[in-house]
C-alpha cells in the first residue's frame, strides 16, 4: 500500500452515495455539515458553491469540487446574498423535486453530487491538511484520469447496466483518489505534497506502509531509503513533523483501530498484523494512545463499520 491509499482506507466507512440531478431556473440548495466528505461535479451548465464562512466559488462544466471535511455549504444558480442563502432548500428535498436522469439535449444545469462516509477520529495528516474545499477546474490536458472517471460515472448513471451495483461504488472510490491526487499535483501549500515529493522521505514512508509489521529500526529504514541514519532522521522529522519510529507507532495503532472497527479478527491476529508481539503489548500501547482498551473501542465503534 502507498501512503495516499492507506490514508483513505484507514478512514473510509461503508459505501459512497451519489445522485445525478438536473435543475433549471433559479435555485438554491443547502447541504448541512456531514461526518464525511462531499463532492460535486458539474456535468452541464454552471453553478456556484457557497461554503459556510468562505468566499463563493464559480463552477463551470467539467469542474469538480471536493469538500473533504464535510463542511456545510450551499449550491445555487448564482452567488446568492445572505438572505437567499438563509432560505436555501435542504438538499434532499431539493433533489427529490428534480429529474435525476435528464436528457442530454435539455437545458439547465446537471450535477453529480455525492458523499463519502469517513471516520474522522484518526485522520491521517495527509487527509487532515486538505483545505475545506478543493476546486479542480476543467482544463484541457490536465487531470486526465479524473476526467475519465467523471465520464465513466456519468455514463453509468445515465443507464443502469448489469453490474452497476459494483461499478458505481468502485468508480466513486476511484473519483476520491483522483481528486486527492489532482490536489496534490497542484497544491501550492501544505506539507504532504512536499513530503511525498522528497525521494528520501517518500522511500521511507513506502517501506513503512508496505510492511508496517516488520521489525523496523532507524538503521534498517535508513538503509531502505539509501541514506545515513542522521540524514533520514533529519529529513523525515522536518517534513513529516515526527521521527520515523514515532510515526510508525502512530500508524500501527491507527491500523489496529481500523481493524478493530472493520473486522472480527482476534486481538492476537491484529497484534501480529501491525507489528506487536502479543495482544498484551498491543493493548498497552493502544490504551496509552486512545485512552481506552481495544475491546471497548471495538464495542463503541461497532455501528460505524463498513457493513453498517
Image (cartoon, rainbow, N blue to C red):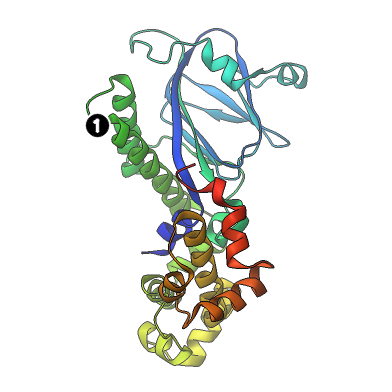
The front one of 227 and 213 is 213
On screen, 123 above or below 98? below
The front one of 123 and 29 is 123
**Residue found 42% across the figure and 76% down from its top:** 272
Crowd rating for badge 1 (residues with CA inside 10 Å; few <14, some 14–19, many 20+)? few
Q: Looking at the rendering, which quadrant does residue 148 occupy?
A: top left
The quarter in which the N terminus is drawn is bottom left
Label total for image: 1
Q: Can residue 77 be seen in the rendering of this structure?
A: no
- Where is residue 78 shown, x and y percent of the image? 61, 18
On screen, 194 above or below 161? below
- Where is residue 54 shown, x and y percent of the image? 70, 37
The front one of 211 and 66 is 211
The front one of 232 and 98 is 98
Q: Residue furthest right?
A: 83
- Where is residue 238 shown, x and y percent of the image? 58, 77
Q: Can residue 75 be seen in the rendering of this structure?
A: yes
**Residue found 62% across the figure and 56% down from its top:** 121
SS assignment at label 1: loop
Q: Which residue is mark 1?
A: 163
On screen, 15 above or below 233? above
**Residue found 54% across the figure and 22% down from its top:** 47
- Where is residue 162 shown, x and y percent of the image? 22, 27
Amino acid at each position: 500500500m502507498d501512503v495516499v491509499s492507506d490514508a483513505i482506507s484507514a478512514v473510509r466507512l461503508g459505501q459512497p452515495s451519489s445522485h445525478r440531478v438536473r435543475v433549471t431556473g433559479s435555485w438554491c440548495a443547502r447541504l448541512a455539515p456531514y461526518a464525511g466528505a462531499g463532492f460535486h461535479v458539474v456535468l452541464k451548465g454552471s453553478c456556484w458553491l457557497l461554503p459556510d464562512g468562505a468566499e463563493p466559488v464559480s463552477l463551470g462544466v467539467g469542474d469538480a469540487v471536493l469538500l473533504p471535511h464535510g463542511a456545510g455549504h450551499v449550491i445555487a444558480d448564482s452567488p446568492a446574498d445572505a438572505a437567499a442563502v438563509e432560505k436555501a432548500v435542504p438538499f434532499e428535498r431539493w433533489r427529490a423535486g428534480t429529474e435525476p436522469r435528464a436528457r442530454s439535449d435539455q437545458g439547465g444545469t446537471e450535477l453529480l453530487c455525492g458523499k463519502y462516509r469517513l471516520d474522522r477520529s484518526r485522520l491521517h495528516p495527509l487527509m487532515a491538511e486538505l483545505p475545506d474545499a478543493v476546486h479542480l477546474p476543467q482544463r484541457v490536458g490536465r487531470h486526465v484520469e479524473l476526467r475519465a472517471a467523471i465520464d465513466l460515472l456519468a455514463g453509468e448513471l445515465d443507464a443502469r447496466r448489469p453490474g452497476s451495483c459494483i461499478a458505481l461504488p468502485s468508480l466513486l472510490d476511484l473519483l476520491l483518489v483522483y481528486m486527492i491526487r489532482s490536489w496534490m499535483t497542484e497544491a501550492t501549500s501544505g506539507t504532504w505534497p512536499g513530503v511525498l515529493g522528497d525521494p528520501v522521505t517518500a522511500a521511507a514512508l513506502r517501506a513503512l506502509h508496505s510492511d508496517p509489521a516488520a521489525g523496523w529500526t532507524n538503521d534498517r529504514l535508513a538503509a531502505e531509503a539509501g541514506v545515513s541514519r542522521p540524514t533520514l532522521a533529519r529529513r523525515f522529522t522536518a517534513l513529516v513533523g515526527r521521527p520515523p519510529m514515532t510515526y510508525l507507532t502512530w500508524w500501527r495503532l491507527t491500523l489496529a483501530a481500523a481493524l478493530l472497527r472493520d473486522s472480527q479478527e482476534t486481538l492476537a491476529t491484529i497484534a501480529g498484523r501491525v507489528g506487536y508481539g502479543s495482544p498484551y503489548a498491543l493493548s498497552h500501547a493502544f490504551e496509552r494512545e486512545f485512552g481506552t482498551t481495544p475491546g471497548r473501542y471495538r464495542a463503541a465503534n461497532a455501528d460505524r463499520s463498513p457493513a453498517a
